[in-house]
Image (cartoon, rainbow, N blue to C red):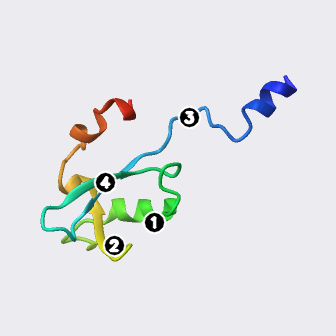
Amino acid sequence: IKEDKAKNFGKSRFKRLHVGVVNISKAMPEIRVFDLEDSPEIELAELIFMSLCHPGLWGSHEWDSQFWTDGGVKSVLLSDVFDKRQFL
């Protein structure tokens, strides 16, 4: 039992959290999906704040010299993004 715990230390039984946000600084806004393992340059609180932003209600959030908002602004359910195999 101790070996199993040591082997799985730091691993979660839960799937990774992916947050879809839109970069509205570009001429053609683009969706970017962040997660904490592949995007260590950003903190979870900042991702959540980006996802809560909505133009007309709370504005946008500036990060990395660009403005970001909730992913639903470009795609209501983000199904075209999250239907990709890497997210299933």
Q: For label 2, count other residues whose C-alpha is less than 10 Å away and answer few (under 14), some (14-19) or many (20+).
A: many
Q: Quadrant of residue 48?
A: bottom left
Q: Secondary structure at mark 1?
A: helix
| Quadrant into which the C terminus falls | top left
Q: For label 4, count other residues whose C-alpha is less than 10 Å away and answer few (under 14), some (14-19) or many (20+).
A: some
> Residue 8: where, in percent of width, then height?
72, 32
Front label number (2 vs 4): 4
Indicate left or right for 49 with 40 as reference.
Answer: left
Q: Secondary structure at mark 3?
A: loop
Q: CA distance from mark 2 to mark 4?
A: 14 Å
Front label number (4 vs 3): 4
Q: CA distance from mark 2 to mark 1?
A: 9 Å
For residue 14, the mark is: 3
> Residue 28: where, in percent of width, then height?
13, 62
Label 2 vs 3, first from the N-terminus = 3
Which residue is painted at 18% across and 61% down in the image?
Answer: 29
Number of numbered markers: 4
Indicate left or right for 6 with 26 as reference.
Answer: right
Q: CA distance from mark 2 to mark 3?
A: 28 Å
Q: Along the line of sight, which residue is nearer the eye, 76 or 62? A: 62
* Up/down of 64 relative to 19, above or below: below
What residue is pinned by disc 2?
61
Label 2 vs 1, first from the N-terminus = 1
For residue 32, the mark is: 4
- Residue type highlighted by circle 4: Arg
Q: CA distance from mark 1 to mark 4?
A: 14 Å
- Residue type highlighted by circle 3: Phe
| Quadrant into which the N terminus falls | top right
Label 1 vs 4, first from the N-terminus = 4
